[in-house]
C-alpha cells in the first residue's frame, strides 16, 4: 500500500446497510485494499437516527454538524473536531441534529465483513 490523501469528494456514498433514512457511508480504504482497518466518511441527514450493536471498534470524527450518541453508559454530544469511540459489542444510537452531520471514521476490523 502507498501513502494516500482523501477528501469527502473521493467517497462514493452508499446508504448505510439496513437503513431507510438519510444515513450514508463511503469507504475509502478497506479489506479490498489489504488494509487491516476501514477508513471512510459518513453523512447523516437532518434528524436521522441509527441504532446498532457495534460489530467492530469504531472511531468517528465529527467534521460538520452535531451528533448525539446514546449507549448504556449515557448520552454524549459531539461537534466539529470531536472524536467518539464506540467499542465493539456496545449498542449505540447515533442521532444527528437539525443540520445533519458529516463524519470521518476508522474501524477495526472491517465493518462491512463483520456485518455479514
Image (spheres, helix red, strand yellow):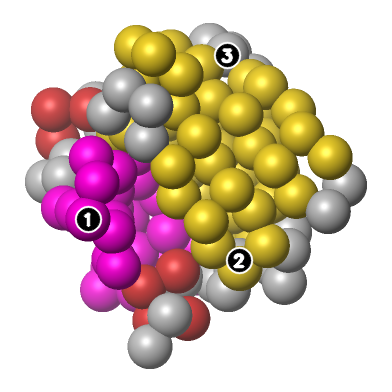
Is 90 displayed left or right of 18 in the figure? right
Residue occupying image coordinates x 26% and y 73%: 32
Q: Which residue is denoted by mark 1 in the rendering?
A: 20
| Secondary structure beneath label 3 | loop
CA separation in Å, label 1 and label 3: 24 Å
> Front-most of 55 and 29?
55
Q: Which residue is denoted by mark 3 in the rendering?
A: 79
Tally the marks: 3
CA separation in Å, label 2 and label 1: 19 Å
Of all residues, the one furthest to the bottom in this rendering is 116
| Secondary structure beneath label 2 | loop
Is 34 displayed left or right of 45 in the figure? right
Residue occupying image coordinates x 75% and y 50%: 71
Any mark on residue 69, and which? none
Of all residues, the one furthest to the right in this rendering is 73
Residue 104 sits in quarter: top left
Q: Position of residue 33 (x, y in %)?
A: 28, 68
Q: Which residue is denoted by mark 2 in the rendering?
A: 54
Residue occupying image coordinates x 47% and y 81%: 114
Sooner in the amino-acid sequence: mark 1 or mark 3: 1
Is 102 displayed left or right of 89 in the figure? left
Is 90 displayed left or right of 96 in the figure? right
CA separation in Å, label 2 and label 3: 21 Å
Sooner in the amino-acid sequence: mark 2 or mark 1: 1
Is residue 16 highlighted in magenta? yes
Q: Position of residue 52 (x, y in %)?
A: 54, 62
The magenta stretch is: 14-42
Amino acid at each position: 500500500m502507498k501513502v494516500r490523501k482523501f477528501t469527502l469528494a473521493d467517497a462514493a456514498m452508499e446508504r448505510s446497510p439496513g437503513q431507510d433514512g438519510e444515513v450514508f457511508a463511503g469507504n475509502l480504504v478497506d479489506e479490498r485494499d489489504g488494509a487491516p482497518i476501514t477508513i471512510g466518511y459518513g453523512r447523516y441527514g437532518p434528524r436521522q437516527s441509527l441504532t446498532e450493536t457495534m460489530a467492530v471498534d469504531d472511531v468517528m470524527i465529527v467534521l460538520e454538524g452535531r451528533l448525539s450518541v446514546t449507549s448504556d453508559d449515557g448520552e454524549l454530544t459531539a461537534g466539529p473536531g470531536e472524536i467518539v469511540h464506540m467499542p465493539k459489542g456496545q449498542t449505540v444510537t447515533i442521532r444527528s441534529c437539525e443540520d445533519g452531520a458529516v463524519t470521518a471514521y476508522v474501524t477495526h476490523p472491517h465493518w462491512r465483513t463483520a456485518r455479514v
